[in-house]
Image: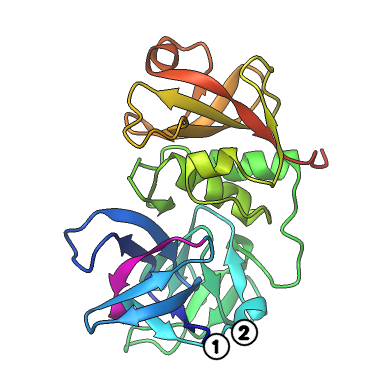
Amino acid sequence: MEPDQCRVINNVLAIRSDPDTAAEMVSQAVFGEYVALLDNSGEFSRIRTSDDYEGWCLSHQIELRSAVDAEELWTVTSAFAEALSGPQPTAQMCTRLSIGSRLHVVHSDGDYVRVNEASNVKVAYWFVLKSCLRRPGISPGFRTDQIERTALSLLGTPYLWGGTSSFGCDCSGFTQRVFGIHGVNLPRDAYQQAASACGVRTGGADVPSALDLVFFLGKRDPRMRGITHVGIALDYERFIHSSGARGVAISRFDDDEIVEEYRFRGGLRLPSPGS
């Protein structure tokens, strides 16, 4: 029997290794994303995300919903989108949504769309600036300038182990989210991304090209995976990544701190996007 489908109804859903709010956060999902419900034990539910990550979340932060309407959802493409109580910038902010959030829009005239996801009893709808969203049926686009713009929009995002959102992300959560916005569905972890069939693996002696995923081995590899870090090449000299020290930042491959901390292990070259 196929598991029930649920939608995330919190702006960010923490997915943990065990049914305990103190357990390790292994990943996240963002508002409107679908997850499969594997088990429910009252306060906590065991779920599986679309990238086959499994873990536990708070049950009240998801709700049963048919996945049939998934293709009708609008996508937040800016780093953040404010959900407001009215269609004007001075309206009360109900919540702040992360990049990648999915919304059910019921009216889209003017600068704001009306969204029927409101969970605040004081408001009937949310209103979200249309320029922060991509409507359903529009190609996500896979162009160098678009992907780079998305990556750069997340500069300064704090590093968060297990994070995949604009509020905080780890290295592979950052790369997965950036490319996911543009229709490339990468696996969750850096070592899995290195083995992905989405592109062609390049060696450590190859010069990185713009938009290559670039992989590194750090000083510690406790799980013996051979890859512990990933970023996105901006050109042959620089890459953007999320690291514990700086969050999402731009580094040079020959920066002292990079050379000291990591060994370059090659990249993954995705099919050439349009310029």
Q: Is residue 133 above or below residue 136?
A: above
| Occupied quadrant, residue 147 | top right
Residue type at numbered disc 2: Asp
Could you tell me which residue is drawn at 68 percent across and 46 percent down? 197
Q: Position of residue 205 (x, y in %)?
A: 65, 14
Q: Is residue 58 magenta?
A: yes
Of residues 211 and 198, the one nearer the viewer is 198
Using the rendered image of the protein, determine whether residue 81 is visible from the camera's viewpoint: yes
Q: Is residue 115 magenta?
A: no
Mark 2 packing: few (<14 Cα in 10 Å), some, or many (20+)? few
* Residue located at (42% from left, 79% from top): 37
Q: Which mark is residue 57?
A: none
| Residue farthest to the right, as pictured | 274
**Is residue 112 found left or right of 242 in the rendered image?**
right
Q: Which amino acid lies under the numbered mark 1 shown in the image of this protein?
A: Ser
Which of the two residues, 255 or 84, is positioned nearer the viewer here?
Answer: 255
Residue at 72% across, 40% down:
270
Q: Secondary structure at mark 1?
A: loop
Read off the residue under disc 1. Answer: 66
Give the residue number, with chain letter if any, for mark 2.
69
Element type where label 2 sits in the image: helix
Q: Where residue 44 appears, x then y in whole percent?
A: 25, 76
Image position, residue 69 (x, y; %) = 62, 84
Looking at the rendering, the stretch of residues picked out in magenta corresponds to 52-60
